[in-house]
Image (cartoon, rainbow, N blue to C red):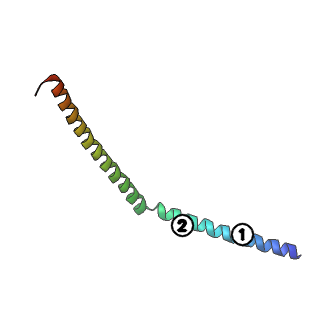
Amino acid sequence: MIRRLFWGLVGIGLGAVIGAAVVRWANQTKARMSPQNVARSASGVLADWRDRAAEAIVAGAEEMARREAELRDELGLR
């Protein structure tokens, strides 16, 4: 009888702990997937992509100008 009571209480305790963890996880996921947070995350990703694209374009233009000057010197066009 005591064993059954002990294991019954252990089961109830584990159920309560696991249930609380699941509810907390669900609330955190709901907050993370709210429209405001998704929009904020997307705008951050887009801003980062825009910055990297701008840096790549600037670097490409600089390399293009350097290579063009190199070719002009080799061909004696200046």
Q: Taking 70 as reference, is 23 left or right? A: right
The label number, if any, that marks residue 44 in the structure image: none
Residue 39's image quarter?
bottom left
Q: Residue at x 20, y 30 (%)?
A: 70
Within-10-Å neighbours for mark 1: few <14, some 14–19, many 20+: few
Image quarter where the C terminus lies is top left
Rendered image: mark on residue 27: 2
What kind of element bears circle 2?
helix
**Dot 2 amino acid type:** Asn
Q: Which residue is mark 1?
A: 14
Label 1 element class: helix
Q: Residue at x 48, y 62 (%)?
A: 32
Q: In the image, which is nearer the foreground, mark 2 or mark 1?
A: 1
28 in relation to 76, above or below:
below
Binning the other alpha carbons within 10 Å of mark 2 as few (below 14), some (14 to 19) or many (20 upward) gives: few
Decide which of 56, 30 is in the foreground and name it.
56
x, y percent for residue 28 = 52, 65
Q: CA distance from mark 2 to mark 1?
A: 20 Å
Residue closest to the eye, 56 or 9: 56
**Residue 61 is drawn in which quadrant?**
top left
